[in-house]
Image (tube, helix red, strand yellow):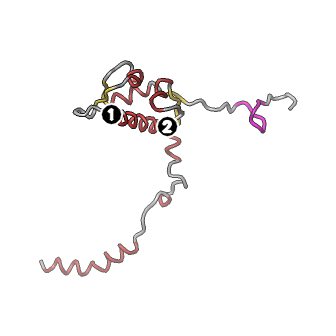
Amino acid sequence: MEWVGLVLAALAPWIVLHLVTRRKRSFQDEGSSENPDSAAVFTNPKLSVSKELAEVIGHGPLRRTEVVKKLWAYIRKNDLQDPKERRMINADEKLRVVFGGKARVSMFEMTTLVSAHLGAAEAPDLAQPRSPEGTETVRPGSPE
């Protein structure tokens, strides 16, 4: 066991030097953009929300992650999670419409049922040039 003490004594200065000079990693160290969420915006676009779902979580366009977060906030606020079987959601009147008439669904089935109430958000019409004020469409060849 004496050799363990000798090895530790020999490595101690190196370990201390490594701990002192080590720098913390951040998003910028990895070569990403200034905004670490920029990739998430591209892969997780805003979606329009149906009228039925909007009564539960509010009007959108919202990202899917925001929809799920607001839905869980609604479930917890109204105490709709089954106390014995935590994976099951007991739907109230508003959620029953969203869940296709089902009174009880699992949390995994819930995401599938909610997807039917999400659609692509309406994008602005980029094909038509707009006036500088943005109020009217400028037609090619027409006097301004």
**Which residue, as the protein is rendered here, is positioned at the far right?**
143
Q: Residues within 10 Å of mark 2 (few under 14, many from 20)?
A: many
Q: Tell me which residue sits at (18%, 79%) in the image.
A: 5
First in residue order: circle 2 vs circle 1: 2
Q: Where does residue 19 sit, x and y in percent of width and height?
A: 35, 73
Task: Measure the C-alpha gap from mark 2 to mark 1.
Answer: 24 Å
Q: Disc number at residue 17?
A: none
Q: Tell me which residue sits at (38%, 27%) in the image.
A: 112
Q: Which residue is mark 2?
A: 63
- Closer to us: 83 or 36: 83
- Give the quadrant of residue 108: top left
**Which residue, as the protein is rendered here, is positioned at the far top?**
101
- Give the quadrant of the C terminus: top right
- Give the quadrant of residue 68: top left
Amino acid residing under circle 1: Asp
Q: Disc number at residue 79?
A: 1
Q: Per the image, is 134 magenta?
A: yes
